[in-house]
DNA sequence: CACCAACCATACATTGACGAATGTAAAAAT
DNA sequence: ATTTTTACATTCGTCAATGTATGGTTGGTG
């Protein structure tokens, strides 16, 4: 095959990752061969082995395109007044997180990570899920402790417990929606649930 | 090989299923061969193909040993007075569900179904998860509607919304604990979260 | 303008899992 | 006592997937 320009090569790399997302989501990671990915992108396995070391390497590259730590979601809002309204910060961060998840790329990759892959090679999806869970739970605890200090929480509810409740609820919603995203909108449902839960947490009903 | 008695044959069948649980949980379903399962049970693949049609058949047999629909959990309590205390019924059902999950067999098989297998053959684990989710969510909605009729719910909280909240929370806890069961007890954590959530739901704080 | 390396296709060797076929010895049935 | 069936073990052919090696063309750089 003829050599391509740098831009073209980068484009085929992206095309391979796009194809990987689609086929992984459809067939599952273990049951899809690199041949299938390459054909779906209109290429051969040679292209895949040029751009990536192996299947695990391709998988990690796929994940790199959709990283979104919880802290960044809050920072992107960029409202300094949120320091005095932690509950509102949580609400807005969840909102923008939900909006990202509705983009096909974010939805597909997370669905693959959560529901369509097992351990393989040096990839351990459960460890990655644990990282994500701990990061978000830590952030939630910080904000809820702030809310407790400001007297915005019910007196009979510890911020640690509230954080675990909220974290579990968000995780459950996350898993459930990624299983059947066509049945409802995570933006609608998620905002409704988060607002309700935060309302139950807050001092003034 | 010599023929075994019926009891011995049934025992080897169970031993194969036990071995399958352990190896599946360790290596993931897709990455474990029937050879590995047989060897781990001290047999060969001949035994596996005698007792089961193929890998998918063995997998389904493994699941059959740990079926536990939500309704049965309530029925097993057998307290007729629970009709007037739906919130208490939910609490007790969750409690006994958590206790079951702490048995290694139930924990392992559910962990495999949720976190260690992809689609393969005619097996679709996501469809099974959806069945479980819908069944439990339906049951929760029934009980919470009963609680609403009896005036045991906050007036500003619809039973449907409460059911979704609780269902999401339980699902999140379920997924999270199955990922790292050695870090905490689901009986302790689960009962605490359920009681707290139900307390937030109830009219009298 | 020349030449090297980037970019991808093609061909080949290796691996390992499946499933079917066959072997076999003892338990049940007659 | 004989026959049949059960409960496995062993062997073998097949096929799909991986990884590597090699080839061919051209863009980029000196």
Image (tube, coloured by chain):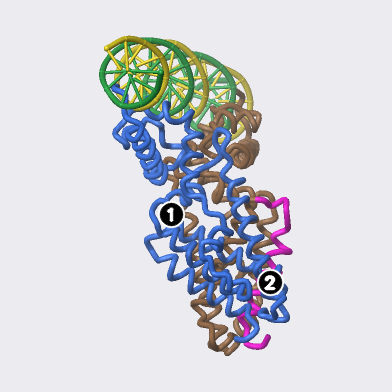
Chain colours: A blue, B brown, C yellow, D green
Magenta: main secondary structure = helix
Residue B122 position in % (x across, y down)? 41, 44
User: Nearer the viewer's eye, disc 1 or disc 2?
Assistant: 2
Span colored in magenta? B180-205
Query: From the viewer's perspective, is residue A189 above or below residue C8?
Result: below
Residue B203 visible in the snapshot:
yes
Report in which chain the residue with disc 1 lies.
A
Left or right of residue B66, residue B133 in this image: left
Label 2 sits on a secondary structure element that is helix
Quarter of the image holding residue A6? top left
Callout 2: 10 Å neighbours few (<14), some, many (20+)?
some
Residue B80 visible in the snapshot:
no
Query: From the viewer's perspective, is residue B63 above or below residue C11?
Result: below
Tell me the CA gap for discs 1 and 2: 31 Å
What residue do we see at 38% from left, 54% from top? A104
Residue B46 position in % (x across, y down)? 54, 27
Report in which chain the residue with disc 2 lies.
A
Residue at the spot of label 1? A107
Label 1 sits on a secondary structure element that is helix
Numbered circle sitting on residue A146: 2
């Amino acid at each position: 095959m003829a050599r391509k320009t740098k831009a073209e090569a980068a484009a085929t790399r992206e095309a391979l990752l796009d194809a990987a997302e689609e086929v992984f989501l459809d067939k599952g990671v273990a049951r899809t061969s690199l041949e299938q990915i390459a054909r779906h992108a209109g290429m051969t396995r040679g292209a895949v082995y040029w751009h990536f070391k192996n299947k695990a390497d391709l998988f990690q590259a796929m994940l790199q395109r959709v990283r979104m730590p919880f802290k960044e979601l809050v920072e992107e809002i960029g409202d300094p007044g949120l320091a005095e309204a932690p509950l509102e910060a949580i609400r807005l961060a969840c909102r923008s997180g939900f909006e990202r998840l509705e983009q096909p790329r974010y939805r597909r990759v997370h669905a693959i990570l959560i529901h369509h892959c097992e351990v393989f090679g040096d990839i351990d999806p459960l460890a990655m899920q644990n990282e994500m869970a701990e990061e978000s739970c830590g952030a939630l605890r910080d904000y809820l402790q702030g809310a407790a200090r400001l007297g915005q929480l019910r007196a009979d509810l510890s911020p640690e417990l509230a954080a675990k409740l909220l974290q579990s609820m968000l995780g459950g919603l996350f898993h459930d929606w990624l299983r059947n995203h066509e049945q409802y909108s995570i933006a609608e449902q998620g905002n409704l649930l988060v607002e309700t839960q935060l309302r139950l947490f807050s001092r003034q009903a």
